[in-house]
Image (cartoon, helix red, strand yellow):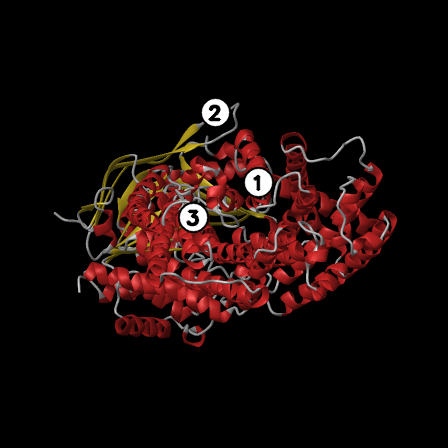
Amino acid sequence: MKDLAGLDYINLRMGSWLGWQIETNWTNLWVYGLYSLARPIASTLILVLIFLVVPQGKLEHPLFVYTYIGNAFFMYVYMVLFGISWVIHEDREHYQMLKYVFIAPRKMYYYLAGRGVAKLAITTFSVLVTLAFGIWVLKIPVDLTEVNYLALGSGLFLGLLCIAALGVILAALSMVTAHHSFYLTEGIAGLFYLISGAIYPIDVLPGWLQTLAQAFPLTYWIELIRRSMNVPLQSQVLSVYSWQELFLVLLISTLVLLIASHYIYRIFERISVKYGLVDRLTNY
Amino acid sequence: MNPELKTNLKAIWGRAYVRVVGANREPSWIVSETVLPVLAVAAYVYVYRALNPDPLFTSLVILGGAMSAYWMNILWSMAMQFYWEKEMGNLDLYMIAPISRMSILLGMAAGGFFFATLRAIAIFVLGIILFQAEFVVTSVWKLFLLFFLSMFALYGMGMLFSSIFMLFGRGAWQTSTLFQEPIYLLGGFYYPVKTLGAAVAALGSLLPITLGLDGMRQLTLKSGKTLGFLSVETEILILVGMSVVFLLAAYYSLLFMERLGKKEGKLSLRWQ
Amino acid sequence: MSYAVQTKELTRTFKVKKTKKEGASEVVALKGVNITVETGELFGLLGPNGAGKTTLIKILSTLLLPTSGLALVDGLDVARLAPEVRKRINMVSGGEHSGYGILSVRENLWMFSQFYGVDNDIAYQRIDRMIEVLGLSEFKKTKIGKLSSGMRQKMNLIRGFVTDPKILFLDEPTLGLDVQISRDVRKYIKSWVKNNPEKTILLTTHYMAEADELCDRVAIIDQGKVIACDTPSNLKRLLRQEAVFHIEVNLSMENLDRFSGIKGVKNFAYEHKHHVGKTELKFILESDAAISQVTDVLRQDGTRIISLSKTEPSLEDVFVALVGKGLENES
């Protein structure tokens, strides 16, 4: 077990190192900085403009800070989820070295998670830039001295574990789908965007979608993040939970997902080996 | 028929065949190209509904979401395609074949257009069914003209990008991701582009899809005219110009970039 | 006189990016290469990895521009008249992974034929005939992602021939293939040239036996320069005055440099066979008498000679004589 644990850590570290190399060594620092700034700010400004175009809309609307904070942290969901699941396609079709990682005597699960760590680091920069832009340029009412950093830190940590587990599940699915399932990952991220209440309270969703949203761990995660940052507006549906209860729900669901992701990954890994899909090329 | 024209037409069909057949043999696209794209669009519908129940905004988002399918296709299936082909080892074979590079790209475009249209229709139809989005077409022929001109200009732009990305290293991927959200911002996919102000809207109008979408909104949404940046007729004229400019630019850019690639030895260079 | 392929002082350099400390440098891949290939010839380009063979093929197939000099294919300048050149050529590389995994063998071949405007009927006729000849009939409807590398390379070869090019460039066509499949491939190449005297093949390889077997003429290239160009038998005659000896010794030897200094040794190569604890030495000597000097040196350090034989020079021997190393090792 000690050896196994040692190997897993190595794979996690190697995956992180490789992920960082792939993400960053394609250009110089300045271009990379611009790239890292442009995307989050553009994504933020889309929301700003949506608020401005509506007749009653303005940035002082209480929904704006609610949407802004949720959207900022949702970047983790998209980037880490996509980052982990895309590893399968990238390594299989582009670099054609997935099979070599696969047959190595290490757990690929941790390699995948490690590749997600690099995305996590990069996304953290984007999230911080977005928050800074919101607080200092758009003047959203977030007082950094009033933030509950314990709730924020612990909630963020759990949420990221949850996202990583979901990413590994998507990666497992990617092992048996073709190259175009880049759109599958986009679609799943879209589904999460819809039901997590990232940019609106889940109260606005129809009843059946609200039920789905309440069954989704990241809904509680984003609500927890907002509460820790003292966002005044709250979802009526989720207001029945204290932040400790939100944390507990998130903790339990994250643990369940982590365990499930291990098993789901192994199932799809077996399927891909059975049908010889590990090194197939499907790009067209 | 002129033998060169015949060869190029065959090349277009040959390359399109891969995309068409590929779709049929990997049916997972059915879900990823029809149902899932609606979800991200739906999120923006609900943001608007949380702010203002006017159904105009729902329709605006649905139309923008539908057209975003074409932008995604241009970015990921056109602009990146020669880069992918290089990585797969096919680019060399395309380069030594006695055909225009545009024929290969047109073949890819034909296949890609099919998928993008499927995606757009799915967003459109599901948007009407699920969100009761309302559309009233005031001029069918102008709508078709606007749509097809946008497509000519857009796919011309895609070919132009393809020529540039051909010589990129891995930065091609990052560049494509960089063009996603900022283009959604500048293109006014989820709000009227005139909200950006005249100067920025003019900048955004360098993208064919911005003007196409703006015009289509004016022709299909109730009170769509109030949302327009320029008149539909002006937008049609500009798109005619853009179609010519982008297609010509793509032609010359492909020649130039190929020559540059051959000079620097980058045409076959993989994993950079 | 019009040649199928002709190069005049052909040179190609590449800039190599290094770290900021080292700065950029230049690699000269081809240096003043002059070759002519006649129509109907099966011309070989023989050299080790990094000699410049693929660079030359890429220039001739219009994938790369020369830095200086001239390259003509069917009398056409590859730099200025690339579109015209492409109508006359095709290329197959060894170890190629081209094509689309989602399509079958037949479909991939048909698709590539369309880039050359081949009519469907003719394309399918050629494809089916070549599939039959190369033993791929069983796999013609198999998606190429499921093929073994040998089958894949056969498919690649068919792709090169199906367009019926005037000049075909084969860049290490048997790379990584087993003996039987390599034999099938070579047999097909030979028969194609024999049955089509107006067609030309330029083949690169680092397998000497392949060049010896297939080629009408061979150019030996090393470090970007053509150091000899003639028929295989004429090249071997270069060594007629020299003796070629093979010696097998019982140890993995170190300090092999001492053999270069022996009087009468023109050149030598070696191959360590670690798994059996032997080293095979090959000496090209100015005369038979020099062998005694070599055996003296071996005996001095107590090395046991397992076998010693004199052979007729092969193309490999010519290569060693000219280049100073075998293709399997560096010395």
The three-letter code of the residue at mark 2 reads Gly
Q: Residues within 10 Å of mark 1 (few under 14, many from 20)?
A: many
Residues behind callouts 2 and 3 on a single chain: no
Check the image and report above or below for A79 versus C156: above
Q: Separation of disc 1 and disc 3 at Cα?
A: 20 Å
Residue type at mark 1 is: Leu
Dot 3 falls on a residue whose secondary structure is loop
C-alpha gap between disc 2 and disc 3: 54 Å
User: Residue B12: percent from the left, percent from the top?
Assistant: 32, 61
Q: Chain of mark 3?
A: B
In the image, C5: left or right of C140?
A: left
Q: Is residue C156 visible?
A: yes
Among all residues in the image, which is located at the extreme top?
C21
Q: Chain of mark 1?
A: A
Instruction: Give the quarter of the image for residue C108.
Output: bottom left
Q: Chain of mark 2?
A: C
Residue drawn at the location 32% of the way across and 50% of the way down: B233
- Alpha-carbon span between mark 1 and mark 2: 42 Å
Characterize the local packing of mark 2: few (<14), some (14-19) or many (20 or more) Cα atoms within 10 angstroms.
few
The answer to the question of whether label 1 and label 3 lie on touching residues, with beta carbons closer than 8 A, is: no
Confirm whether residue C303 shows in the render. no
Tag count in the figure? Answer: 3
Find disc 2 in the rendering and name its residue: C23
Image-based side of C7 in relation to C208, left or right: left
